[in-house]
Amino acid sequence: MKLKLIVARWIHKFLQHTELMTENMRSPKTIGLAWVARTLMNYSNAQVSIDIVSRMKLKKADHVLEMGVGNGLAIKEIAKIIGNKIIGVEISAEFRRNLLKMKLPKNIVILENDAKDLSNKVPDGSIDKLLAINVIYFLKPIEEYILEFKRILKKGGIGYLGCKFESIKNFDIEVAPNRDEKAIISQLSNLGFSASSEFIDLGEDRSRYTLIKFEKL
């Protein structure tokens, strides 16, 4: 294991319950803690990003939006398949700067909007597939975001949430209030989606996650 990962894990172990550390896991911005967040995300999300994109069963003509692009792992996988414009939403200026440096494929557009209101950028019923990995915990009020999912998805459009509920159980609850799988599924169902979940085990602690899938009725 690389030294920088060991150091990042050690720092996170002692600070994970704090509001400041949780804020940086949501949107890296504090010197030092932003590095911890980016290091942990790069390590823990690599296999999950590849796996979840493969489960989306994308078609070249699909219109796709990823919410919380982060380090760009998943959106780069999506771009290997999709020919249309791919929309990425990322509120973290730190992540957006890094994404610009990566020279992403030209059909990827990164927005800095808060995803609870994309009305000036994403038309009603225009998205076939929506993806969010390790994002749902931080959305508040969650109902406003779910209603925006409903607005932008086509009828029959599908959303995919990659979640690691065990990993975030000690996060500050004010910053990351959505940590109950059943409650999230219930909220999706109540607001017009058919929702279900599946636990995915790819063989390592970092690659075990819950996949919540929801389809617009």
Image (cartoon, rainbow, N blue to C red):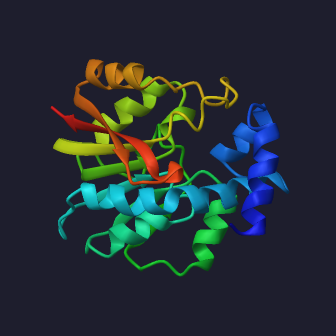
- Residue in the picture at 47% in, 23% down: 180
Q: Is residue 169 left or right of residue 147?
A: right
Residue 86 in percent (x, y) is at: 35, 65
**Mark count:** 0
- Residue in the picture at 55% in, 54% down: 90
Q: Is residue 138 left or right of residue 160?
A: right
Vertical placement of residue 194 versus 50, above or below: above
Residue 211 in percent (x, y) is at: 35, 41
Q: Is residue 212 left or right of residue 106?
A: left
**Residue nearer the viewer, 8 or 212:** 8
Q: Is residue 35 visible?
A: no
Vertical placement of residue 199 versus 133, above or below: above
Kindly give the residue lying farthest to the right in the view shown. 31
Q: Quadrant of the C terminus?
A: top left
Residue 139 in percent (x, y) is at: 53, 33
Vertical placement of residue 128 versus 104, above or below: above
Residue 89 in percent (x, y) is at: 49, 54
Q: Is residue 147 visible?
A: yes
Q: Is residue 103 left or right of residue 24?
A: left
Q: Quadrant of the N terminus?
A: bottom right
- Residue in the picture at 32% in, 49% down: 130
Vertical placement of residue 174 versus 93, above or below: above
**Residue nearer the viewer, 16 or 124:** 16
- Residue in the picture at 60% in, 29% down: 169
**Residue nearer the viewer, 208 or 124:** 208
In the picture, residue 49 is in which quadrant? bottom left
